[in-house]
Amino acid sequence: MQAIPAAAQDAPGDIAGGRLTIDLGALAANYRKLTELSAPAETAAVVKADAYGLGIAHAVPALARAGCGTFFVAYPAEGLAVRAAAPGARIFVLSGPMSDKAATTFADAQLIPVLNSVEDIALWRRISREPAALHVDTGMNRLGVSEDEAVQFAAENTGGMAIPLVLVMSHLACADEHGHRLNRQQLNTFQHVAALFEGIDSSLANSAGIMLGADCRCALTRAGIALYGGRAANAVDNPMRPVVTAEARVLQVRGVRAGGTVGYGAAARLERDSILAIAATGYADGYQRAASGAGVPLRSAVSDGASGFVCGKRAPIVGRVSMDLIAFDVTDCGGAVAPGDWIELFGANIALDDVAEAAGTIGYELLTGLGRRYERVYVGADN
Ligand SMILES: *Cc1c(COP(=O)(O)O)cnc(C)c1O
């Protein structure tokens, strides 16, 4: 039987519509900055969802070279990818051991499950003698054993059947809001529980938690979005370097008279004679339709659509983002934009989080949804 060619996966540059340039030097610099902020705590890198869309195979070695020795993923399969990229690393799997059958996967790749429930604890005890982490819920009501269950586990986990615990962790619900009362409440509960596990490392802070203050940093911090240049804390200038630049190729440049309408639903009507650049990216590439410049319901919370960046200027999106195409208003470039040029969707000039906000979402969702049609170019690997 003949092999069926894969459809447009990671298209090469000469035929790709969009391109992602991923600056591994900026990633390494962000890691080093977070280690300074976290010190004396160790800083782990959270690389779930293929390193927030950047690609585990490239991001993990760059982080390891920058000194990162501990990684967190969501699922065991992601842990295998990290193991291949960083043979000597310590790898935690946040979603836990999953099933009895996963025991060999965890053992073979030396993955450490995060035990999130009494059932997870029983399962791990049944199938393995290997180390594990314990997740305690301190108020988020997502994953984790309760405070009472943690107390009971601390008392019972002794003798020959004891699980070799290497980490006690919890997760903050509102770390991005500095003054939120739940932060203090969760910290208090966590400190109480962590004290029951003497000599075992504790971990509470994600990226935003690192910025909350020394109390939350414990022995190990878990940095995700800030590594990738996203904004971790609201109402604070983002101190991280952008890591991902997304660009779309201009397919066509057209003049449209005032009064003309653009795109599906004729949702935008031009108020002046305009020059539009039609670029090769769309919602199928994870550039959300809700970031449209006009005519999309359910985006009423934000008034303006997103912009691109070309010829040294911001170019607003006109009309609806479609599956594979976006129209940008490049009238102010005065004819300087031509087919084959590239428009920045986000990167050094347009903040990832501004595009996300225009679409009513967060940088995390934009990054992790970027899709497989882009050419991915990795730069700065030797920094
Ligand atoms: C995703 C995740 C993190 C990383 O969060 P960021 O906000 O991206 O820094 C840390 N801890 C847990 C439990 C997570 O699920």
Image (cartoon, rainbow, N blue to C red):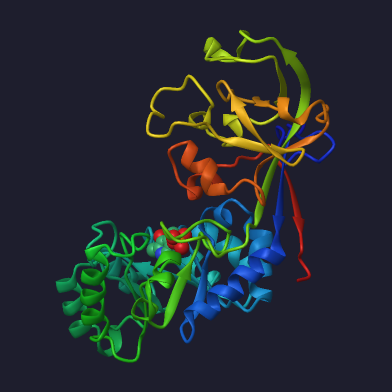
Please tell me whether residue 33 is drawn above or below residue 144 in the rendered image.
below
Q: Quadrant of ligand 1?
A: bottom left
Residue 254's spot in the image, x, y percent? 76, 17
Picture residue at 66% right of the left edge, 76% below the top: 66
Q: Is residue 86 in view from this perspective?
A: no
Picture residue at 23% right of the left edge, 79% below the top: 193
Classify residue 15 by image quadrant: top right
Closer to us: 183 or 255: 255
Residue 118's spot in the image, x, y percent? 23, 67
Describe residue 59's horizontal placement relative to residue 352 as left or right. right
Residue 305's spot in the image, x, y percent? 52, 31
Q: Give the number of callouts.
A: 0
Classify residue 278 by image quadrant: top right
Which quadrant: the C terminus? Answer: bottom right
Closer to us: 353 or 94: 353
Residue 93's spot in the image, x, y percent? 45, 65
Describe residue 140's horizontal placement relative to residue 17 as left or right. left
Classify residue 147 by image quadrant: bottom left
Q: Is residue 127 in view from this perspective?
A: yes
Closer to us: 270 or 162: 270
Closer to us: 48 or 234: 234
Please tell me whether residue 135 is drawn above or below residue 214 in the rendered image.
above
Which quadrant: the N terminus? Answer: top right
Describe residue 59's horizontal placement relative to residue 364 as left or right. right
Picture residue at 46% right of the left edge, 60% below the top: 232
